[in-house]
Amino acid sequence: MPCYLRDRGIDQVVAPLPNDVGELWTALEGYALVLYPYEGGRTGMAVGLTGRQWTDFGAVLRKIHDTDPPEWLRRLVPLEIYTPSWLGTVANLETWALDPSWSESDDTSAALASFWRDRGEEIRGIVRRATGLGAALREREPVLVLCHGDIHTDNLILGPGGRMSIVDWDAP
């Protein structure tokens, strides 16, 4: 997807470099290796964005969302299912934190359990809200667009001369 977007003139998208035979990854011992160009600068989260940079960021996202992908790319990009991937982790943490038989083996574990016990209702409220919103979204017929699956200012590199680069395309 990042190569497709880059090839469509969205220069802010950082796409992988082809290997010596023109492929975008190299297989090595059961792994796929991908090489991206180095983007010098600092993350938007580290330095903050100006009003103009926020506007530019929004304009780039609009270009990405407006790009009409061909059928072969549509088949490759996963669809959002509106079910938080972290639900199981939250349930496991709550079970652990509320279990009176667990051993407070270290300060970090004890602090996490204490936090969970103090804020459990708030955490359960967040889970209920996320689950409810997901259910409501699944009932709609969404307009499907290409999206960066983890867009935030830490995945935005601000380089010399005001160059803006969007990185971390592993979950479109």
Image (cartoon, helix red, strand yellow):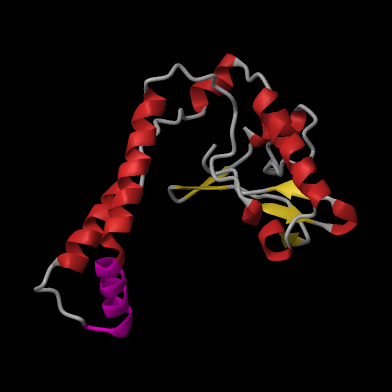
Q: Is residue 159 above or below residue 19?
A: below
Q: Is residue 68 left or right of residue 73?
A: right
Q: Is residue 4 left or right of residue 128?
A: right
Q: Write down the region rendered in magenta.
A: 105-118
How many numbered marks, from 0 up? 0
Q: Is residue 27 above or below residue 98?
A: above
Is any atom of residue 38 visible in this view? no
> Residue placed at 37% from the left, 20% from the top?
139
Q: Is residue 73 above or below residue 34?
A: above
Residue 9, picture quadrant: top right
Q: Is residue 100 left or right of residue 133?
A: left
Where residue 4 appears, x then y in whole percent? Answer: 68, 29
Q: Using the image as rendered, state which of residue 30 and residue 53 is in the foreground.
A: 53
Q: Does residue 112 belong to the magenta stretch? A: yes
Where residue 163 appears, x then y in whole percent? Answer: 84, 50
Most frequent secondary structure within the magenta stretch:
helix
Q: Does residue 157 belong to the magenta stretch? A: no
Quarter placement of the N terminus: top right
Is any atom of residue 79 visible in this view? yes
Residue 23, picture quadrant: top right
> Residue placed at 67% from the left, 43% from the top?
16
Q: Is residue 11 above or below residue 74?
A: below
Where residue 172 appears, x then y in whole percent? Answer: 54, 36
> Residue placed at 65% from the left, 53% from the top?
153
